Image (tube, helix red, strand yellow):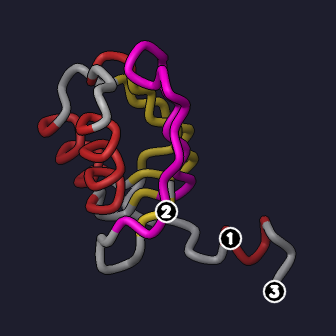
Amino acid sequence: MLVADDMRLLYSRFMPDIAERRVLLLYPIIITGITVSKAVSVLLSNGVAESNILLLSLFTTPSSLDQISKQYPRMTIITSDVDNHIPHNFTTKYFGTD
């Protein structure tokens, strides 16, 4: 799925049996959690159980982690780092566009 900066759903295509699957939601840098919340709500509206969603992230701020975990307490969140200082240049270095 693809969510725009203004939280519009730009694209989604799911397997017909998505409601019976465990879903890995990948989002490398979570600063506010707003986009992740939109993505989770789309999955929930397509029948995926909250407990079947695993959110995977590399960098997450404490405030976004708190907000997401309160909003979706049954969702598993896995992140490599929780810090207020997020490497904003991560995507340019990762994709080699610097």
Picture disc at residue 91: 1
Q: Is residue 61 magenta?
A: no
Which mark lies nearer to you, 1 or 2?
A: 2
Q: In x, y percent, where is residue 26?
A: 55, 44
Callout 2 amino acid? Tyr
Name the image quarter holding residue 49.
top left
- Looking at marks 2 and 3 on the same chain, the residue that comes earlier in the sequence is marked by 2
From mark 1 to mark 2, how far is it between C-alphas?
21 Å
Q: Position of residue 31 (x, y in %)?
A: 37, 63
SS class, disc 2 = strand
Q: Label 3 belongs to which residue?
A: 98
Tell me residue 4's x, y (percent). Answer: 41, 74
Tag 3, which secondary structure? loop
Asked if the magenta segment contains residue 23, the reply would be yes
Residue drawn where x is 28% and y is 55% of the image = 38
The reply, left or right, for residue 96 in relation to residue 82 is: right
CA separation, marks 2 and 3?
27 Å
Between label 2 and label 3, give the one nearer the viewer. Answer: 2
Q: Amino acid at mark 1?
A: Thr
Which residue extends farthest bottom? Answer: 98
What SS does tag 1 mark?
A: helix
Q: How far is the residue under mark 1 from the one under mark 3?
A: 9 Å
Badge 1 local density, few (<14 within 10 Å), some, or many (20+)?
few
| Disc 1 and disc 3 in contact, CB within 8 angstroms | no
At 42% from the left and 13% from the top, the residue drawn is 20
